[in-house]
Image (cartoon, rainbow, N blue to C red):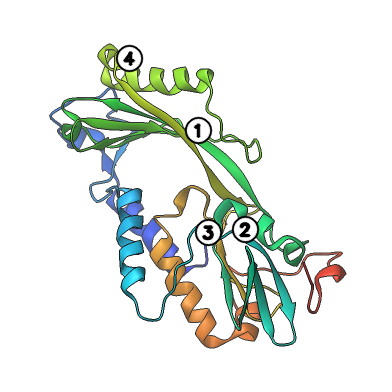
Amino acid sequence: ARCEWPVAEACYTDLIAQGKHVAQRKHAVELPVSPTSDLWFPNVSNVRNPRLLKALAVMLAQHPRVRVSTFTPVQGVEATDQGLKVMLDGQNRLARHVVCAAGAWSTRVLQNLTTNVLKVRPVMGQMLSLKYANSEAIPMVLQNGLYIVPRKKGLVLVGSTVQRCGYRKQWDVQTYHRLLNFAVDLLGETVRQTVQAQWSGLRPEADRDLPVVGAHPTVPGLWFNTGHFRNGLVLAVGSAQHLVQHMNQGWAHSVSANPLGLALRTNAADVTGATVL
C-alpha cells in the first residue's frame, strides 16, 4: 500500500523520477554493477549520524526552554488525573504531554500503556568499517539488501544485516565474513585485510509498513514518534513536522485523522482510561 503521508510520498516520487541507469554515470572507481538493471540516483547523499547527534545535543543545550537529562533511565509513565507522570531514576516529573521516541525500546519503556496498542520490536543490524584509500571516489551502492557507503579520510562502511533476535546486540563471525565478502566482491580482494571495526545496533520495527507518529488512542497527552526501522534519519524532519502539526491540532483530532497514528486493537479493554504502569 502506498503511504498516505504527503512528505514521504513526495520523497519517494522524487527518487523514482530521478532514477537513471548506472551506465550513464562515470566514477573514478568502476564497480561491478549492471548497466541494464541497476539505477543511479544522483541526489542521494549520506549523513554522519554521530556528528548530526552531537550538533543536535549542542543546540538543545543552548536552548533556554530545554533541559536534557543524560544517564537518567525512564522507569515508566503513569496516567493520572493531573497529567502524565514520568518516573525517572529517583524522581518523578508531571507533564501535560509526553512524546515517546525511544526507538527499539518504545514498547518496553511504556509497558502496560502500550498493551494491544503499540508493537515495536528491535531488529539488529551489524556493520563493518574498512580502510580504502580512494574512498571518496566510489559511489554508495545498495545491492541484495547490503550496502557500501564511502566516508572521508579513506574509510568505507559496509552493512547492514537485518536480524530479528530480540535485544541481543552481539556481533558474530558468520556475519563478519558475509559483509566482508560483499565488500570484496565490489572493491577487490585487497580490502580483506583492512577491516577497522565491527559493531551492531538495534532498529525499531513497527508491526506495519509505516512508522508510528501521533497520539495514543486512549491516553490523552501521550504521543509516539517511533517505528522508523531503517529510515529514521531519512524521515526525521518529516516525522517531527508531522508530530508537531498533530500536537497543535489536539489529541482528539490526531486520534481520528492521522494516517500514521494508532488504532485501538481488539481485546484492548485493559488499556482504556488511565492505565497505570
Tag 2: amino acid:
Ser
What mark, if any, has residue 192 been given in the picture? 4
Instruction: Give whichever of 52, 33 is nearer the camera.
Output: 52
Crowding near the residue tagged with mark 3, few <14, some 14–19, many ≥20 C-alpha atoms within 10 Å: few
Q: Is residue 259 visible?
A: no
Mark 2 → mark 1, Cα distance in angstroms: 21 Å
- Can you identify the residue that label 3 sits on? 2
- Can you identify the residue that label 1 sits on? 161
Q: Quadrant of residue 36?
A: top left
Mark 3 → mark 2, Cα distance in angstroms: 25 Å
Dot 3 or dot 4: first in sequence order is: 3
Which residue is rendered at x = 48% and y = 80% of the image? 245
Tag 1: amino acid:
Thr
Instruction: Give whichever of 249, 31 is nearer the camera.
Output: 249
Crowding near the residue tagged with mark 1, few <14, some 14–19, many ≥20 C-alpha atoms within 10 Å: some
Which residue is rendered at x = 64% and y = 66% of the image? 90
Which residue is rendered at x = 36% and y = 62% of the image? 57
Crowding near the residue tagged with mark 2, few <14, some 14–19, many ≥20 C-alpha atoms within 10 Å: many
Dot 3 or dot 2: first in sequence order is: 3
Q: Nearer the viewer, mark 3 or mark 2?
A: 2
Quadrant of the snapshot with the N terminus? bottom right
For the residue labelled by badge 2, is the local secondary structure a helix, a strand or a loop? helix
Q: Nearer the viewer, mark 2 or mark 1?
A: 2
Q: Is residue 109 left or right of residue 11?
A: right
Mark 4 → mark 2, Cα distance in angstroms: 38 Å
Dot 4 or dot 2: first in sequence order is: 2
Tag 4: amino acid:
Arg
Q: Position of residue 274 (x, y in %)?
A: 78, 78
Which residue is rendered at x = 71% and y = 77% of the image? 219
Q: Position of residue 16 (x, y in %)?
A: 35, 52
